Image (cartoon, grey):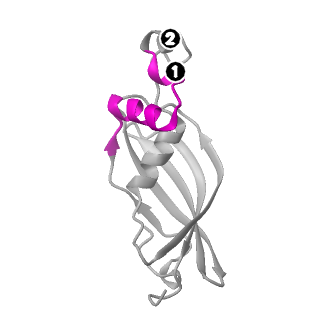
């Protein structure tokens, strides 16, 4: 998605990512990396008694995987500019397969480049949205940056 100079983005255009399955190894590695060992993610017996009946993926893990599914071309992407209205709206379980849908909703020129704003939706194989947010990426105005 973020592979073009600022002037080449059009409000209303959409993009779909490839998809990726969330594994138990993802939960374990994310827990180790982040230090988040909350039992809803890591304790099968504890999680079975909770509201979802099983372990769920960390919301921040799903957000991290979603960014990994996006295209960020070096020399074009200058910075991750921000994220607004982030919501984890449905659980993502081990063995769910997620993908990212994005729609350009705004563009704003900046001195160092241009900010492309997108409505981001992460969905799983059932078609349900699991994460929604507005993301902003600072991209180059030209290829000389």
SS for tag 1? helix
- Determine which of the numbered discs, if any, sits on residue 46 in the image: 2
SS for tag 2? helix
> Could you tell me which residue is drawn at 37 percent across and 56 percent down?
17
The first of marks 2 and 1 along the sequence is 1
> Could you tell me which residue is drawn at 49 percent across and 15 percent down?
47
User: Which residues, given as a range, are shown in magenta?
Assistant: 20-43
Magenta segment's dominant SS is helix
Left-right relation of 50 to 27: right
Q: Which residue is mark 1?
A: 40
Label pair 2/1, CB-CB below 8 angstroms: yes
Is residue 41 shown in magenta?
A: yes
> Could you tell me which residue is drawn at 44 percent across and 50 percent down?
66
Q: How many marks?
A: 2
Please tell me which residue lies in front, 96 or 112: 112
Residue 11 placement (x, y as % from top left): 56, 73
> Could you tell me which residue is drawn at 53 percent across and 37 percent down?
59
Residue 16 placement (x, y as % from top left): 39, 58
Say if residue 129 shows up in the picture: no
From this view, report whether residue 56 is shown above or below residue 65. above
């Amino acid at each position: 998605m973020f592979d073009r100079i600022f002037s080449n983005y059009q409000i209303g255009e959409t993009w779909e990512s490839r998809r990726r399955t969330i594994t138990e190894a993802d939960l374990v590695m994310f827990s180790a990396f982040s230090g988040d060992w909350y039992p809803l993610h890591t304790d099968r017996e504890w999680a079975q008694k909770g509201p979802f009946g099983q372990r769920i993926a960390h919301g921040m893990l799903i957000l991290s995987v979603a960014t990994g599914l996006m295209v960020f071309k070096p020399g074009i992407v200058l910075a991750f500019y921000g994220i607004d209205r982030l919501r984890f709206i449905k659980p993502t379980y081990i063995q769910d397969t997620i993908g990212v849908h994005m729609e350009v909703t705004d563009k704003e020129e900046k001195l160092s480049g241009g900010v492309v704003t997108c409505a981001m939706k992460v969905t799983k194989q059932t078609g349900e949205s699991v994460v929604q947010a507005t993301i902003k990426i600072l991209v180059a105005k030209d290829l000389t940056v």
